[in-house]
């Protein structure tokens, strides 16, 4: 017997979730009776001091595999992220996850810094690992605190945004033209410069995605499709390429070779992504709207797009108009100060014996 209706229209609960523990009570409504039954069953299976849950002895690598099976496989770069996390687990000695502490992670971070790792990359990897614990806890797979909650991200000097000038774009395209073995590299680069797409998005284009003087990107990082207009001339050249060669071939290595041959120097860690930065930078410098740029680039938040705001001709223009020196003739102020210093020196020379 569990929940039954009585003759007077009430609801009676009579359950025995475990042997020897029986609960009986009567309620006015069936909803109350159902909640009481569920509460009793939960209380009976809840861990107690005399009946503790089995200890979680899974190693960190096993937790990462569990995260991938439950959630990571849904992420665009999930498999690559899993491999990065497994490498972290190996460097930590693959401890039992419940025994992992902030000190272990701080030691790993220090060794990575001393080995020359970029602080931003270290922060990214630690964010990935923190997300593993948070997601597994949300799913109810673990019930202990996240060991990375005590670790603060590294602070580092933000790098100046690099992009190609008009002259450098010409140099790069000329260098790409000389790559006879990879006809894809030139067109993929042009798509990135014309639309602000990521290299992988442009490289995976098909003829069906280039119609009506626009390109539709479907294999995006945010998993959202976006359509960006292009010139009729570029569309014609793309269709001519697809008709002759089919789809683009993998050509990132060819692009890197052309970049080196062009003599253009970029900061460490940048290659194909500079094309996306170049589109966004020139878009803003030419008077483009920051909200429009957000949609074109496919950013999930405006924070990412604001990196380009300082390139706008009107960005922080009030700092020039409203600063305390606005309206002062600073050149005459310097001249007066120089004249006073000269007169003082002359006076001192006259008074000297």
Image: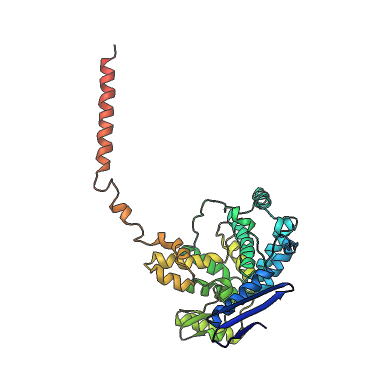
**127 vs 243: above or below:** above
Name the image quarter holding the N terminus: bottom right
| Front in this rendered view, residue 325 or 279 | 325
Measuring from the top left, give residue 335's x and y in whole percent: 26, 36
Residue 264 shown left or right of residue 79 in the figure: left
**122 or 263: nearer the eye?**
122
* Residue 221 % position (x, y): 56, 72
State whether residue 351 is above or below residue 294: above
**Residue located at (40% from left, 66% from top):** 284
**Residue at 54% from the left image edge and 86% from the top image edge:** 8
Does any portion of residue 167 appear in the rendered image?
yes
- Residue at figure coordinates x 40%, y 67% from the top left: 290
- Quarter where residue 136 is shown: bottom right
Circle count: 0
Q: Position of residue 81 (x, y in %)?
A: 65, 66
Left or right: where 338 falls relative to 166: left
Task: Specify whether 141 is left or right of 285.
Answer: right
Q: How is the image coloured?
A: rainbow
Using the rendered view, name the quadrant where residue 345 is placed: top left
Residue at image x 53%, y 69%? 173
Q: Residue 340, located in which quarter of the rendered image?
A: top left
Which one is in front, 227 or 58? Answer: 58
Q: Is residue 183 something one can see in this rendering?
A: no
Residue lying at the far front in this picture: please name it.
8
Please tell me whether residue 244 is drawn above or below residue 328 in the rendered image: below
Quadrant in the picture for the C terminus: top left
- Depth order, front residue of 276/222: 222
What is the x, y in percent for residue 147?
64, 56
């Amino acid at each position: 017997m569990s929940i039954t209706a009585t003759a007077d229209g009430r609801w009676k609960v009579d359950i025995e979730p475990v042997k020897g523990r029986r609960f009986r009570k009567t309620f006015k409504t069936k909803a109350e009776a159902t909640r009481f039954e569920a509460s009793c069953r939960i209380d009976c299976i809840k861990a107690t001091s005399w009946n503790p849950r089995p200890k979680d002895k899974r190693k960190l690598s096993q937790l990462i595999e569990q995260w991938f099976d439950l959630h990571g496989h849904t992420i665009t770069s999930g498999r690559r992220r899993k491999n990065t996390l497994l490498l972290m687990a190996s460097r930590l000695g693959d401890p039992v996850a419940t025994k992992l502490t902030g000190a272990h992670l701080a030691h790993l971070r220090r060794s990575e810094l001393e080995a020359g790792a970029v602080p931003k990359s270290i922060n990214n990897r630690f964010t990935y690992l923190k997300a593993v614990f948070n997601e597994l806890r949300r799913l109810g797979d673990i019930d202990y605190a996240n060991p990375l909650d005590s670790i603060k991200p590294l602070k580092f000097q933000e790098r100046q945004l690099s992009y190609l000038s008009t002259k450098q774009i010409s140099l790069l395209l000329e260098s790409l033209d000389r790559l006879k073995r990879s006809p894809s590299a030139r067109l993929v680069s042009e798509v990135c410069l014309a639309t602000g797409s990521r290299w992988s998005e442009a490289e995976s284009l098909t003829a069906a995605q280039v119609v009506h003087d626009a390109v539709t990107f479907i294999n995006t990082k945010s998993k959202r499709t976006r359509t960006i207009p292009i010139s009729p001339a570029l569309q014609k050249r793309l269709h001519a390429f697809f008709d002759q060669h089919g789809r683009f071939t993998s050509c990132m290595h060819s692009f890197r070779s052309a970049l080196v041959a062009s003599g253009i120097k970029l900061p460490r860690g940048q290659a194909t992504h500079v094309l996306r930065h170049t589109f966004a930078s020139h878009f803003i410098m030419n008077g483009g709207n920051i909200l429009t740029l957000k949609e074109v680039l496919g950013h999930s938040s405006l924070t990412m797009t604001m990196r380009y705001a300082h390139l706008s001709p009107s960005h922080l223009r009030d700092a020039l108009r409203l600063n305390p020196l606005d309206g002062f003739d600073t050149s005459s102020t310097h001249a007066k100060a120089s004249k006073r210093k000269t007169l003082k020196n002359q006076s001192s020379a006259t008074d000297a014996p």
